[in-house]
Image (spheres, helix red, strand yellow):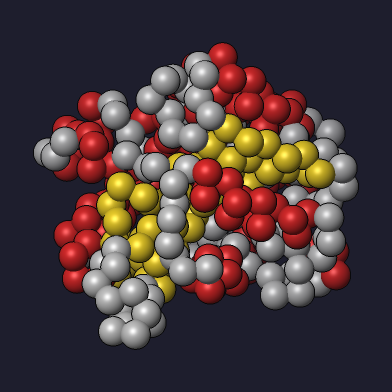
Amino acid sequence: MLTKKINLWENNETAFLSTYILDNSDELHPNKKRPAVIICPGGAYLATSDREAEPVALRFAAKGFHVFVLRYSCLLKNFEDFDLLLEEGSLPEINKNTQMPQPLYDLAKTFLIIGQHADEWHVDMDKIAICGFSAGAHLTASMGVHWHRSTLKDKFSVESSKFKPAALILGYPLIDYSLTEENSRGDEFTGKLFEFSRLAHFGEKYPSKEKMKQASPIHFVSENTPPTFIWHTDNDELVDSENSLAMGLALRKKQVPFEMHIFENGVHGLSLADEVSAGDSTYINEAAQAWLPMALKWLEKQNFTL
């Protein structure tokens, strides 16, 4: 397996790609091009979660996928900085290169880097899925609804098809910013979390409703949106499952193939929902562990053959 860290930009060391590229063996599938999965961990655009990064990548790699973990531009270096922020009430050193559409540019650059090395790494460029969690799922959905628009084409001076995902996997996604505003009204911690998440993504804690609408993938679902797999827990305390339900309805209206699973119970941020990715027992959920096997079966239906 080829594992390496690739910085996306010369002036932004916080945005980088970690590769998990399977070796091509003369004994096993010589010169075979494999499908790939790009993992976008969550973290409210404050930082990217380790629990939703390598543990998930290794699980997909074990099933024969090349995997790339994108650490996209976030406000803080790590979650400890957010704890200090809440305790001391002042901002630590922050990354000023986080405002939209910078994370989307990070993801677009990831596609271009993979494309540049597709022959060397034996990647099937027609079979690249993006798997995101929470804010990472927001980023994943944003690419799904915006890949064909002029924003990315003009930024990189290449054809839009270079950024087209073949499939999306959305884990407890933030899809509609108006729903986060409703959820943050009664809980002090959640309110602070979303304040600084919006600061990261918009450059201000209280952006206008129009700005939040423009940043909400739900309003841009179209026939060009790739087939999508969605999973959530109904009592998610941070990102309401209504986000996933709304996304499913929007996809259905546009006749985009999708599969969705809403598990009855489970906290936000489950990742694999087992011991491998759990920070503590709160994040172990036997029922929700089924999402990954179901997602793999669904990818087979989308012709992600190994």
Residue 116 visible in the picture: yes
Q: Is residue 95 visible?
A: no
Left or right side of 258 for 291: right
Residue 152 on image: x %, y %: 25, 36
Q: Quadrant of residue 252?
A: top right
* Relative vertical location of residue 53 with respect to residue 177 in this rendering, above or below: below
Q: Residue furthest left?
A: 157
Q: Which quarter of the rendering shows the N terminus?
A: bottom left
Spot occupied by residue 290 in the image (x, y as percentages of width and height): 74, 56
- Residue at horizontal 22%, vertical 56%? 115
Q: Position of residue 259 (x, y in %)?
A: 63, 36
Could you tell whether 182 is left or right of 211 in the image? right
Where, by quadrant of the figure, is residue 282 drawn?
A: bottom right
- 230 relative to 22 in the view: left or right: right
Q: Is residue 52 left or right of residue 110?
A: right
Q: Residue at x 19, y 71 (%)?
A: 120
> How many numbered discs sit on the rendered protein?
0
Q: Is residue 65 above or below residue 258?
A: below
> Can you say which quadrant of the picture contains the C terminus?
bottom left
Q: Residue at x 83, y 60 (%)?
A: 285
Q: What residue do we see at 47% from left, 43% from top?
A: 302
Q: Would you place residue 288 above or below residue 228 in this image? A: below
Query: Quadrant of residue 16 in the image?
Result: bottom left
The image shows residue 221, relative to residue 129, as above or below, that is above
